[in-house]
Image (tube, rainbow, N blue to C red):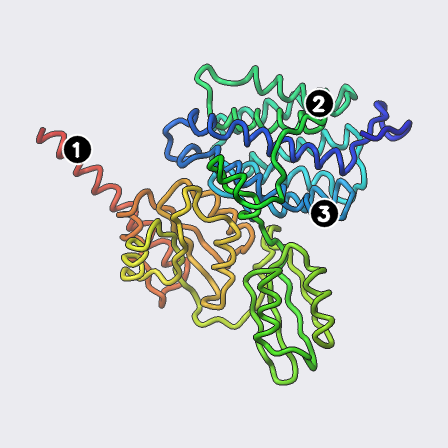
Amino acid sequence: MADTIDNDNTGEMITGSDYKRMVLGAYGEFLNEFENINVVKESSAFFYSGKPGSDVLRTMGAAVIPLTEAVNESIGGLARRVADASVLGARGNAGVIVSQILRGLAKGLIGKYTATSQEFGKAFQYGILYAQKAVPEEKNRPIIVASKVVAKGAHDAVKSGKHISDILLAAIKASSENNSTHKDCGEQILQVFLEGCLKGLQGDLNLPPIDVGKKMYEARGIVSPIHDKARPYCVSFLVANPKLSVPLIEKELQEIGNFVVVERRFKTIFIHVHSEHPGTILERAVAWGHVGEIHINIMAEPHAMAMVQQACIMPQALLTVAENDEWAQKLQEAGAMVIIDGSDPSGPSVEEIVNAAHSDIANKYILLTDSEHLRLVMHQVKRIMGDRVSVVVANNNEEQIYAVRAFFPELSMEENVAQMREAIRRMSQDRKKNILQEDKDN
């Protein structure tokens, strides 16, 4: 860590390199502990469904990938890149919580080249606050209770003018002392994150290279971070008097981005692509012709895609997740229009759902899931896309089918959401009555 003699009373400055080591340290600690977190999880319909340790590991994997290619050495710039990637790469409810911690950190560090201990400590408190806001209706969840205790421990250390290592130690101590008698998965995730940050800050990094191929990770039964690379920037522009054909431009863009749209419009070509490096896209484009009307949206930001206009086939569509091909066919027969592959144990990422809802099929989407495991993922998509989407959560496959059958394209989004939730409520009540009747009969 670089030192200076002014700014705050500790004289300590935290640099972009320090922040990079902290994030890598957190990822390394989750690599060591994700299986233990999966074992510790309690059977609960909400936060602990699925494999939260694996979900957080993959979310952190998406977060660290930008660090392998980052040219911005400022702590604010690096924090922003990490946050954007984690928000879109988040998987499962646990992953969304961690992505919001990173997003809050970035908000607290925005515009800073380096940060004092006090500035970083305050940014850390932002991170905890964003985590709490991700589940406002779950104020008594252990992860939320623990985060408040951790925030107070960090606040007291910041107020005392301590170094960043001491601030993290105070937060870890507060987290450890708060842990319930029966260890809670959410509390453990928070503690692993803090301990990893401290180890990384101290240079205690022991992890495989994050930019290598998949084999090293597959040998341990882990998904490589490269597989979870997020592309947070939506880039669109026109190329006048293009020198390349549409197929050649498409081929070139697909090598460096995804969600590629290339359309000829008389003497110009319209290009739309998602990328982790907008500059790379535009650098290629200047060789194709005269570039103009450039628009770049950061998809990880709340309501970032709400104002993106495009020609759509229909006013609204129903988007849902299917765990296999057989179930996808049943959902399609029941009336679902856009079906996302949910066969991955961690479920689809936020980015995968945003990309599907960002297609030209419909202007608005109702997002339907049959798993509480994806509830915060769906709501993170809503934060990004704003009023263009609404979320409906069913509890099982049967409720999901009933909800799909209650959807009618000619109705408004509000009417459909009301009908679908009512269908789920009635289905749930009928199931409870049947269970009670079976108990009486037995």
Locate residue 250: give its quadrant.
Answer: bottom right
> Which quadrant is home to the N terminus?
top right
Q: Nearer the viewer, mark 2 or mark 3?
A: 3
Residue that appears at 38% across and 52% down: 321
> Which quadrant is home to the C terminus?
top left
Q: Pick whichever of labels 1 and 2 is earlier in the sequence.
A: 2
User: Which is more toward the observer, 328 or 143?
Assistant: 328
Position above or below: 172 against 334: above
Q: Secondary structure at mark 2?
A: helix
User: Which is more toward the observer, 299 or 383?
Assistant: 299
Q: Nearer the viewer, mark 1 or mark 3?
A: 3
Q: CA distance from mark 1 to mark 2?
A: 53 Å
Does residue 87 appear to the left or right of 165 in the view shown?
Answer: left
Q: Are marks 1 and 3 in contact (CB under 8 Å)?
A: no
User: Which residue is under mark 2?
Assistant: 167
User: Which residue is under mark 1?
Assistant: 436
Locate residue 102: give its quadrant.
Answer: top right
Q: Secondary structure at mark 3?
A: loop
User: Which residue is under mark 3?
Assistant: 70
Q: Residue flagged by tag 2: what amino acid is it?
A: Ile
Does residue 40 appear to the left or right of 187 in the view shown?
Answer: left
